[in-house]
């Protein structure tokens, strides 16, 4: 699996993954919506074993568990499902 990320997070930082799209255009549109709502977010592109590329939209990074929970609660209020993922160096 090949990973490409827009930013480098501190080791051990967490993100809230809010979507994964086969098309980059949809991922960019969703990220832009979240940016307009005041979230810090990025897109991580991942190539699967069968060479498909998915674009993950992630909010964060978070090193403070309370800040992560606050963002999760706000996203939940907006009807956006989240999954916590940890950054890897």
Image: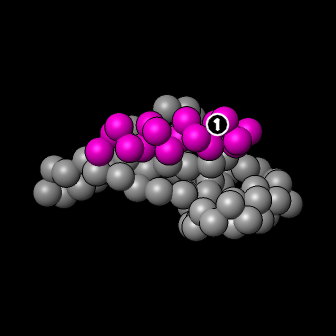
The quarter of the displayed image where residue 78 is located: bottom right
Residue found 24% across the figure and 55% down from its top: 48
Q: Is residue 36 above or below residue 77?
A: above
For the residue pair 46 and 40, the one nearer the viewer reads as 40
> Range of the magenta residues?
23-41
Tag 1 residue: 35
Above/below status of 52 relative to 7: below
Residue for point 16% across, 50% down: 51
Q: Which residue is more in the foreground, 88 or 59?
A: 59
Is residue 31 covered in magenta? Answer: yes
Numbered-mark total:
1
Q: Main secondary structure of the magenta part?
A: helix
Q: Residue at x 49, y 32 (%)?
A: 6
Measured as percent of width and height from the top left, residue 10 is found at 66, 42
Would you say 26 lies left or right of 70 here? left
| Residue 8 found in image quarter | top right
Q: Position of residue 67 (x, y in %)?
A: 82, 54
Q: Position of residue 59 (x, y in %)?
A: 62, 48
**Is residue 84 visible in this depiction of the protein?**
no
* Residue 22 colored in magenta in the image: no
Q: Is residue 16 left or right of residue 74?
A: left
Residue 68 drawn above or below residue 9? below
Q: Secondary structure at mark 1?
A: helix
Residue lying at the far left of the rendered structure = 50
Frontmost residue, 33 versus 88: 33
């Amino acid at each position: 699996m090949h990973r490409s990320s827009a930013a480098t997070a501190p080791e051990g930082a967490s993100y809230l993954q809010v979507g994964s799209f086969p098309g980059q255009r949809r991922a960019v549109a969703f990220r832009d919506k979240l940016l307009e709502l005041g979230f810090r977010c990025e897109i991580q592109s991942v190539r699967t074993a069968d060479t498909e590329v998915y674009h993950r939209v992630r909010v964060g990074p978070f090193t403070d568990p309370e800040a992560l929970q606050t963002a999760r609660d706000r996203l939940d209020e907006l009807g956006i499902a989240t999954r916590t993922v940890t950054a890897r160096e």
